[in-house]
Amino acid sequence: MNFNRKISLAALALFVTVNFTFAQVKKKPASKGKPVAEAKGTLLPVDPNVIIGKLPNGLTYYIRRNDQPKNRAELYLVNKVGSVLETDDQQGLAHFTEHMAFNGTRDFPKNELVSYLQKSGVKFGADLNAYTSFDETVYQLPLPTDSVKIFEKGFDILANWAGYQTFDPKEIDAERGVVLEEERLRGKNAQERLSHQILPALLNNSRYAERLPIGKEDILKTFKPETIKRFYHDWYRPDLQAVIAVGDFDPKRVEQLIKDNFSQLKNPANERPRTKYSVPPSPGTTVKIATDKEFPYTLAEIVVKHPGTKTRTTADMEESIREDLFNQMLNARLGELTQQANPPFLFGRASYSSFLGNQDAFTSIAVAKKPEELEKAIKAVVAETERARKFGFTATEFERAKDATLTQMENAYNERNKTKSVNFVQEYQRNFLQSEGIPGIEYEYNFYKENISKIKLSEINALAGKFISDQNRVVLVEAPEKEKDKLPTDKVLLDWIKQAGQGVKAYVDEVSNKPLLAKEPTGSKITDEKKDAAINTTTLTLANGVKVILKPTDFKNDQILIEGYHFGGTSLVSDADFTSVSLAAEVVGNSGLADLKEIQLDKMLTGKSVSMSPYINETSEGINGSSTPKDFETAMQLLYMYFTQTRKDQDIWQSTISQNISVLANRSLDPTSVFQDTISATLGNHSIRRMVPTADMLKNASLDKAYNFYKDRFADASGFTFVLVGNFDAEKIKPLLEKYLGGLPSTNRNETYKNLGIHAPAGQITKNVYKGIGDKSSVQMVFSGDYEYNEDNDLQIEALKEILSIKLIERLREKESGVYAPGVRYSVSKIPAQRYNITVLFGCAPANVDKLIAATIEEINKIKQNGPEAVDVQKFAAQDTRSIEVYLKENSFWESHLVSSSQEGEDPDAPLNSIKNLNKVTVQTVKDAANKYLSGDNLIKLILLPEKK
């Protein structure tokens, strides 16, 4: 929950993990039984809603009943096993073991596990997945619980992973290529090369620096089956494992299933001790300057490492709150610097967070706008910390930070019975791995309410002095190789840091006492009301021509989603004005409202859970936002003001232009960016509107044109449609809708968009891009054409996409061992023209490009000639059924659907028949769709290859 600190930026950059997404690092370990008084406070209690147990063999389990989403469960197998435990000849085998879990176990030979789960509605990669890190390996298995057979089989699957992997030598050899392709996909780039330069310094040549999870290529290519079996035997054992089950089920039955499936697992005789590695402290400051030919930014990181802490007690929790408040206030000040006309950096941040190897770290990062401005960027970031150390924070900053913190906790508390199961899983996972407390949101919320007012500003102000040190400090600089001569020496770099903050003055908190909205609008009345009982919507028409679609739900307790649109957009301006107007919504949205600068507006809204942002795209303009029920009127006021009381801020304009130009400066160094820019240009038929603007185009852009265009697009609300989805009473909010939406200006211009005719060119085109020094390629194959937009065609093209994805995983990954994660995506449009795109994409070795393209075409031709296998149609229907069941209970789906159905004139009730309509997908219909949409007549092949030597 909120009191936990986000993992440090440096640690985030470091974690070269396998399919790993960082959750917030939560420092709150559990205790069992009654609270015990300690010198540092009272031990935190354990959430009474979770059952925690341990089998005689040492396996730990966590069980919690939770019906969000309904008829679903999250099953995880968590192992205190990662790459740090590998011997020299096993480097990369912790991760390889994770792969082998899907390639043969006692009860699921070869790839039968993946096929079984796909037929049960579980998608490989999206649902069924795993990751390996330095210290842990985690397997995730989301399952339906309305099928007893499938759900209970899930515990057998977890047990198979935990102790019954088979490591068939043939399967090992087949998987080598897949793992090497994962290494190629994630590595062989500037980030990987820079990490090899900086990690020894940052991690003080510790075990962590020597054991990156992906391992070493030569070992992955040549290790013997006995070597990986030895790793599995030593470390995959019940006393290092936990089963976490959270979902819509009977906890007692689940506890019995865990006992039945895991009690037979045994720990090895003479088991090896599980060493806890750390990053040893280093005296003084270590400096490392690293460059790479393809790295597009110049940045510095200052990492001051401290002994790691655990939030075991109430006193620890109070300290964690202090650190969070400190981070909030310091970064709010850094954020204000970006609103200057000429910001001192492209990005700046500083925070105290958890690090690696039982350490915390105070990490400051400064990304320079250009290499010669690195000194300016570093000094600006460090100066803010120095300002806080010398003068502290103001009372008004402190109150705002506390308000914001309490609001976040209140939101979490209000959603306590609407929290998704995966959120609980992540908490329990951290409890098992890092001994973090799990007192539960009720305890946390009440603790915050009772104790945050007791925290003194002087205690927060003292933290800067505690965090800043020149001991156990690492200073890193990363930059493009071509800028090497512009970089400082170690001594100069340290002098910059030492000099930063000299002469700083106390911070002045710029706040406004003016009301958000000085004069309330007159508004207009509802003139028409229509109900759709099938999906529980009400459509209102106001006297000024505004239409409002309301869908009250109980999916979330503290959420209302708001979106409004009107046709027009940038399609109405010339190419000459496009660059200017494309920035209009961003600039206006960041410029504040009425007499309030953005800084003042942000401060005024502290403590409110509300957001509102204008947008302008090619065919429409509109508003996106959200709020809690409590703050709904504030949301309506902001919406009203983005139509009627916008600001023209020259500083924000200049800041936006300078930041964009800075990003462009070295964009051409990065192969991925160059490839993506080529894709956009090619598929957009080289329209200026599909290409990245040049620095000259940005310099010549006009604030007057941007602002005037924005004002014009929001001058007439008569054609606007707003969609509101969430926890509200339609009758109770009608007066607010009449006041604020009914008060929007109306001139009845009756405008719409223009079809500019920008789409992928016809014919067969191959575009090779030679960029990059790494031995890696990326391939995109784009099929496109005209489309008849309707519900039946949408279903068939979606089925084709999913089935082709299944076949390409089987062919390109499993059979050819040539790719890690082949993908298929599609898009269909009705506005501004009826078109479709289907894109096949994958990364691979340059030497395999032609072979894998040919294999892709061969799989497509099989479907065109014979149709898909019936089992693949079954897999699609099962997976889509499960997806539909979940998204029909999500506010975000209904908001998106109601907006698109309104825009496109489609049936808003269509989702209710989505599951029933799946029976329209057959072997023949998918075959017909393949011949229709994958004919190859319009096929663009885009291929990224290494630079020619």
Image (cartoon, rainbow, N blue to C red):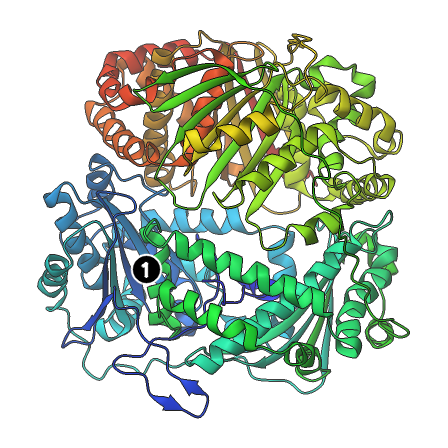
Point out residue 107 in the picture as x, y percentages from the top left corner: 13, 51
Q: Amino acid at mark 1?
A: Thr
Circle 1 — which element? helix
Q: Is 512 on the left-hand or right-hand side of 320? A: right
Residue at point 79% right, 44% down?
Answer: 659
Which of 921/762 is in front?
921
Point out residue 471 in the picture as x, y percentages from the top left corner: 69, 85
Q: Is 573 on the left-hand or right-hand side of 738? A: right
Q: Is 406 on the left-hand or right-hand side of 351? A: left
Whether 580 is drawn above or below 414: the answer is above
Is there any visible trace of residue 769 in the rendered image?
A: yes
Q: Quadrant of the C terminus?
A: top right
How many numbered marks have been drawn onto this rendered protein structure?
1
Which of 511/92 is in front?
511
Whether 58 is drawn above or below 568: the answer is below
> Residue 64's quadrant in the figure?
bottom left
Residue with the most extreme bottom position: 39
Residue highlighted by disc 1: 97
Q: How busy is the neighbourhood of tag 1: few (under 14 within 10 Å), some, or many (20 plus)?
A: many
Point out residue 308 in the picture as x, y percentages from the top left corner: 52, 80
Is there any visible trace of residue 20 in the rendered image?
A: no
Q: Is 712 on the left-hand or right-hand side of 42? A: right
Residue at point 17% right, 48% down?
Answer: 109
Whether 485 is drawn above or below 551: the answer is below
Point out residue 801 in the picture as x, y percentages from the top left corner: 38, 24
Q: Quadrant of the N terminus?
A: bottom left
> Residue 872's quadrant in the figure?
top left
